[in-house]
């Protein structure tokens, strides 16, 4: 039968109080006398102020507006239908012509049905319904939210093409 190995000095020190293993540890620190407890005074006996948890106000509902738009797209535009063959310059010219008609009092709904390349809103007269700023690409959202109800925007260019926006609400 094998005899168990003799425990190392470090292992023995783990079982013995720290001061007994002074050769393995740093010298003991000087003993410091405990400080006397502070004397209670009238100001120290006041109750601590109550801690009231701060509740954040409920989040505001993000502003929503309603608008309609006319999108004039071009061949390389994002999401352009394969049937669109006009160039970017041609699309811009077409958007300028439609904007002139709208400013001259043309019916925006009818203009959107006739000229808009947006397959979703075009047939509905350009109606986009209500939306928040985050739901639209930044140039479109910036223009739409800057309008007052009933106002018409200048031409707004996005990756999708050229937009004419009418804020409805």
Image (cartoon, grey):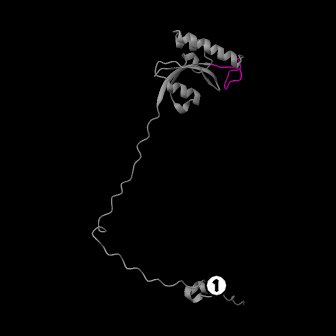
Dominant secondary structure (helix, strand or loop) of the stretch shown in magenta:
loop
Say which element carries label 1.
helix
Q: Which residue lies at the image location 57% right of the left edge and 89% below the top edge?
A: 20
- Disc 1: CA contacts within 10 A as few (<14), some (14-19) or many (>=20): few
Magenta stretch: includes residue 123: no
Quadrant of the image for the C terminus?
Answer: top left
In the figure, 122 relative to 28: above or below?
Answer: above
Closer to the camera in the image, 70 or 32: 32
**Residue span colored magenta:** 72-84
Against 62, is 89 above or below? above
Q: Is 119 placed left or right of 132 in the picture?
A: right
Rendered image quadrant of residue 161: top right
Q: Tell me residue 86's x, y (percent).
A: 71, 16
Q: Quadrant of the N terminus?
A: bottom right
Across and down, in percent, residue 12 comes to 61, 87
Q: Position of residue 99 (x, y in %)?
A: 57, 14
The x and y percentages for residue 167 are: 49, 21
Q: Is residue 81 magenta?
A: yes
Dot 1 corresponds to which residue? 10
Q: Quadrant of residue 16?
A: bottom right
């Amino acid at each position: 039968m094998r005899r168990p190995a003799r425990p190392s000095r470090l292992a023995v020190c783990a079982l013995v109080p720290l001061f007994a293993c002074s050769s393995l540890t740093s010298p003991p620190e000087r003993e410091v006398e405990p400080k006397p407890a502070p004397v209670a005074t009238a100001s120290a006996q006041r109750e601590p102020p109550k801690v009231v948890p701060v509740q954040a106000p409920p989040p505001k509902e993000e502003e929503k507006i309603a608008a309609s738009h006319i999108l004039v797209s071009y061949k390389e535009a994002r999401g352009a239908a394969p049937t669109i063959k006009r160039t970017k310059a041609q699309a811009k010219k077409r958007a300028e012509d439609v904007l002139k008609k709208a400013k001259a009092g043309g019916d925006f709904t009818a203009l959107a049905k006739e000229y808009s390349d947006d397959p979703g809103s075009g047939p509905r007269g350009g109606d986009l319904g209500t939306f928040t700023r985050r739901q639209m690409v930044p140039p479109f959202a910036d223009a739409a939210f800057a309008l007052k109800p009933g106002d018409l925007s200048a031409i707004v260019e996005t990756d999708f093409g050229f937009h004419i926006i009418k804020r409805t609400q």
